[in-house]
Image (cartoon, rainbow, N blue to C red):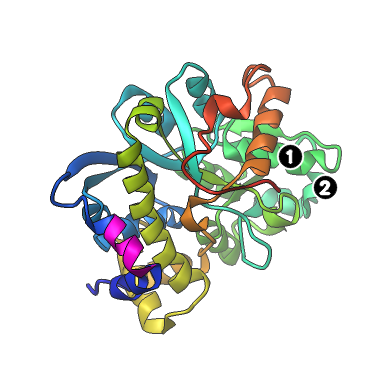
Amino acid sequence: MPNLNRRQTLGLMGAAATATLATPAIAMNKKIVVGALRLTSHSGSFVALNNGYFKDAGLDAELRFFQAAQPVAVAIASGDVDYGVTAITGGLINLAEKGAVKVVGGALREEAGIQGMQIMASKAAHEAGLTSPDKLDGKRYGVTQSGSSFHYVGSRVAAQFGGTPRFVPLQKVGAIIGALKSGQIDAWNIVPHIAKGLIGSGAAPLIGNVVDYLPNYQITTVFTSAKNADNERAMTEDFLAAFGGGVRDYNATMVDKENGDDAINAMVDIIHQYVYTDRPREKAAPSIIAGSMRLSPDSELNLGSVRDQMQWMQSEDLINSSVTLDTFVDTSYVKTMDT
């Protein structure tokens, strides 16, 4: 498998950035565990591991996979995982309030002009009239857990039309897909590499795009234990630098299409080691390519979006009203924006 874009990307990063990644390698070789989901939105970690950026940063990284966001936060709080890249959830913030975890950067985000998360209806619900998000009131909306990103999106989108869906917690993404296909739930939203397959097969018609209702939504964040954020600054900075190298490769190749078709095919080979592993490469590739979304460069974090998610959780009594951004976000590691 080709070492995709590594030389190219390191050249773009410049000599100083290359030195930052390479200097600790021999001295540290620090073992870390990175929590991830088998989604293209986690490609920053996949590419960083494949292209040697973790190793160059002195980190012996292992990926550990989960089926929903909240269990990653629990694993970080328990010390089983060192860094995670998942959505902000009520569970994560509640753990942060206990002094267990901290958000240190941003990852996947919605961006105008780039296909993002899509809202779908079950075939039965669509035929019964659920053809747009303004009709979500009272409909059964699939979520993994209460306080998950799916819960946030469904609630915030429906509220723009005065609606309130009935949220159905199904714990795992696979279970939600099955429930949507069988008509046990009426609607759901998910990243495009999964949504497009459901939409294209006719199993779940498209009824809306999340970016039209939640522009600049910070879908996922980079987080770690409060202990790492507070006491392991060098290691956390090394992790963010290595992860950032993977993000740069991914965005340049899959989102901005700067490196040509051969680079895209090589990147698909990397991602397919972790996503759609049960499918032949030729069948997985179209979904992986179609599902390319922007990952935040240099882990930039949109505090405006994070604040909105926090305030929504407070309005739903999912977290304490006393929680502030400082409770669960450490803004000292990355650049922030507020939109």
Give the quarter of the image for residue 250.
Answer: bottom left
Mark 1 or 2, nearer chain start: 2
Above or below, 215 against 234 in this view is below
- Residue 158 visible in the displayed image: yes
The magenta span reads 14-20
Above or below, 169 against 40 in this view is above
Q: Is residue 19 magenta?
A: yes
The residue sitting at 54% across, 49% down in the picture is 335
User: Mark number for residue 134?
Assistant: 2
Q: Nearer the viewer, mark 1 or mark 2?
A: 1
**Secondary structure beneath label 2:** helix
Above or below, 191 against 98 in this view is below
Q: Main secondary structure of the magenta part?
A: helix
The residue sitting at 62% across, 48% down in the picture is 189
Q: CA distance from mark 1 to mark 2?
A: 11 Å
Residue 315 at x, y = what percent?
73, 24
Amino acid type for the residue under numbered disc 2: Asp
Above or below, 78 against 312 in this view is above
Q: Which residue is mark 1?
A: 156
**Secondary structure beneath label 1:** helix
Give the quarter of the image for residue 43.
Answer: bottom left
The residue sitting at 65% across, 48% down in the picture is 217
Residue 302 at x, y = what percent?
61, 46
Amino acid type for the residue under numbered disc 1: Arg
